[in-house]
Image: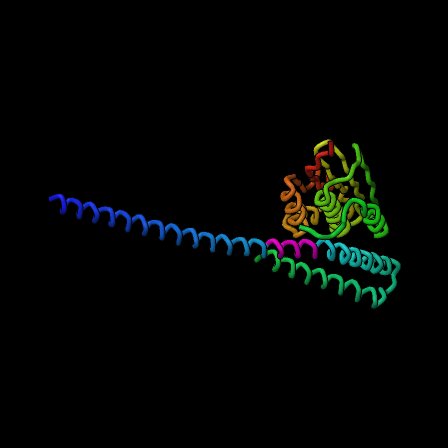
Amino acid sequence: MLYAAGAAGWVVVMVVTSRMWQLHVREVEQRADEAERTKDEAAQRRAMEERLRIARELHDSLTHNISVICVQAGVAVHLARKRGEEAHPALLAIQEAGAEAARELRTTLSVLRSDEDGDSSGLGQLDGLVARARGAGLVLTVTVTGAERVLPPEVDQAAYRIVQEALTNVSRHAGGASASVHLHYAPDNLSVRIDDDGAGAEAGPVTAVRSAGTGLGLIGMRERVTALGGWLRAGARDGGGYRVHAELPARAPH
């Protein structure tokens, strides 16, 4: 009897041990599968982030300059026709090539986005940006309030890009408008506000398009601000015109 009981006990121990080993092996396999899945997801996320970074930089760097070229060529063509003259073929070619380049760039960016940043742009280049905008015919004022200070690089760059995109949109969509840029340095944040008065025959319907917020420029601005923990609002103003307003966390150094 004692032998039978001992044998039965060993059988129970062996069965339990075997079951525990099977559970352990299964758990190890599940962990391995989870680790592999996490690794693949991380790789996909890095690839998507890189595509987004490329799309954002292409948009910021190229769309602005292409838009300025198109606007200046368009103004020259308009003035020539207003004087009763035929626009020079070279101007028409520049205008057409610029518009085609802008379309192709938007298509490329859409592909990149469907499936942050390493340059040195920042508010230190704001004077140059303002000078170029004024040179393109935009009536522009700039106001800076609060205790101006050195900002974290990512905040500095985001603020510059927001102003750049907003001014580009004013030049493209609100013909004849005047604009204002207001930067306010608070202890814990930086406020960036760009207003335009929407003057000009084309301002009404095109401002409505801008307020929809579907352009890649607005998407890029929101992505930048959200990534930094801030907020951005863009839309039509009461009484006419358009406003882009962002607030970026930027705590003052102690």
Name the side, left or right, on which 49 lies relative to 165. Answer: left
Q: Nearer the viewer, residue 73 or 22?
A: 22
Residue at 88 percent of width and 63 percent of height:
85
Can residue 203 be seen here? The reply is no
Q: Which residues are magenta?
A: 49-58
Residue 242 found in image quarter: top right
Q: Where, quadrant-wise, is the C terminus in this rendering?
A: top right
Residue at 73 percent of width and 34 percent of height:
252
Can residue 168 be seen here? The reply is yes
Indicate the position of residue 208 as horizontal and vertical percent values: 67, 46
Q: Residue furthest front?
A: 3
Name the side, left or right, on which 32 lies relative to 80. Answer: left
Figure label count: 0
Indicate the position of residue 55 as horizontal and vertical percent values: 66, 56
Indicate the position of residue 144 as horizontal and vertical percent values: 81, 36
- 57 falls in the magenta region: yes
Q: Where, quadrant-wise, is the N terminus in this rendering?
A: top left
User: What secondary structure do most residues of the magenta stretch adopt?
Assistant: helix
- 170 falls in the magenta region: no
